[in-house]
Amino acid sequence: MPSIANHLKYFTESVIREMTRVSNECGAINLSQGFPDFDPPAELVAAAKRALEQGFHQYAITWGAAGFREALARKQRYWMGLDLDPDTNIVVTCGSTEAMMVAMMTVCNPGDKVIVFSPFYENYGADTILTGAKPIYVPLHPPGFNFDPDELRNAFKQGVKALVLCNPSNPTGKVFTREELQYIADLAQEFDAYILTDEVYEHIVYAPHTHTYIASLPGMFERTVSCSSLSKTYAITGWRLGYVIASQEVIEGAKKVHDFLTVGAASPLQEAAVTALNFPLSYYEQLQNEYTRLRDCFLGYLDQTGLPYTIPQGAYYVLADISDFDVKDDTAFCRWLAKEIGVAAVPGSSFFHESVNHLIRFHFAKREDTLKAAGERLLKLKERG
């Protein structure tokens, strides 16, 4: 039999999804894969029921239902401070996962070089390789997970086509400052590169930190491909509604890539999601307050366990340090944690290009009683450290 594609040997299946399977097998509390255990807003669920009853069962326009794009453009005009046209600046995708793949395939040719910060969400390296491009990893240095300006400049000097920017960051919870983003923007303009953003946690940011869209900086809209989704903001990860926002030239290419990847996102869910996109500003204030409360609740339990961690500035993940357990294999440790302690986490090595095995990632997008139960189980670690 002929062999399968060579590039598949350069990455593995998702470790995050694997840890969900381990969690299910062990009956552990799943703090690995980042999805909530609470329902979306009731009015959004009601809107989905109406959409199904009103006959939205066939294909929408491939690059997104008109009403959805109009509502999204209206919302993002406010948050991004950009004059967005729903017909020429937006492509609706099947989640931000497809959005990033569309972005990568739209701007990169085989052989191009793409900067990926390390640690990184596991899809970025795979997306680069599947596109035929070559990832160049630039480390984010703990404890603040900041980049070294000279290291980043040297990476750009290698003739890169694009840089992937996750902001707020998964897995670190870092929120890039305006000054950091301006430095990246200046390099992108100097070396004529694109910025591909993953901004799915744009509305989950903890005071005093604020989210800045790099596309909104002077001269950056034309060279930024902004990817995001509704998954995290409205607790609908299973709806798979994402989008790409970019200049008309980039969007014309993205429409073609998206059309032949998935044709289109779910029609009734796009109709329903217009309700969410029209939520008042108070919704986003409440979202921030609720996640701040959940973060503080979970970090309180980590404090009791004695596990060191980096305080998340945004998103809903925390990297905890397990150095005291003298771990040689963080994946084996996470399997042990799920089986013996009853809490599932993700081994940090799956996020790093460098050899790192002393960190694990938890997420806290759970009800407070779920976090309490997980926290009480984690207290057993005090006896084993």
Image (cartoon, helix red, strand yellow):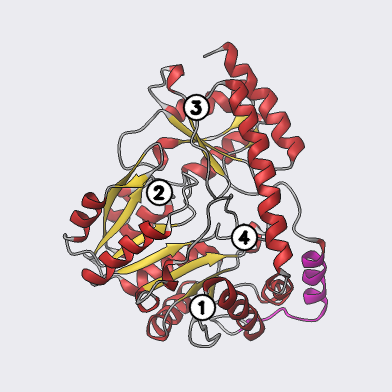
The mark nearer the N terminus, 3 or 4, is 4
The mark nearer the N terminus, 2 or 1, is 1
Please tell me whether mark 2 or mark 3 is closer to you in this view: 3
Q: Determine the secondary structure under disc 1.
A: strand
Which residue position is annotated with label 4? 231
Separation of residues labelled 2 and 3 (CA atoms): 20 Å
Residue at image x 63%, y 86%? Answer: 66
- Residue 120 bears which disc, if any? 2
- Where does the magenta region start and end? 43-60
Residue at image x 44%, y 77%? Answer: 246
Under mark 2, the amino acid is: Phe
The mark nearer the N terminus, 4 or 2, is 2
Q: Determine the secondary structure under disc 3.
A: loop
Under mark 3, the amino acid is: Pro
* Residue 354 pos. (x, y %): 30, 38
- Residue 91 bears which disc, if any? 1
Separation of residues labelled 3 and 4 (CA atoms): 29 Å
Please tell me whether mark 1 or mark 3 is closer to you in this view: 3
Under mark 4, the amino acid is: Ser
Q: Determine the secondary structure under disc 2.
A: loop
The mark nearer the N terminus, 1 or 4, is 1
Which residue position is annotated with label 3? 308
The mark nearer the N terminus, 2 or 3, is 2
Is residue 51 shown in magenta?
yes
Residue placed most toward the observer, 74 or 369: 74
* Residue 368 pos. (x, y %): 74, 39
Under mark 1, the amino acid is: Val
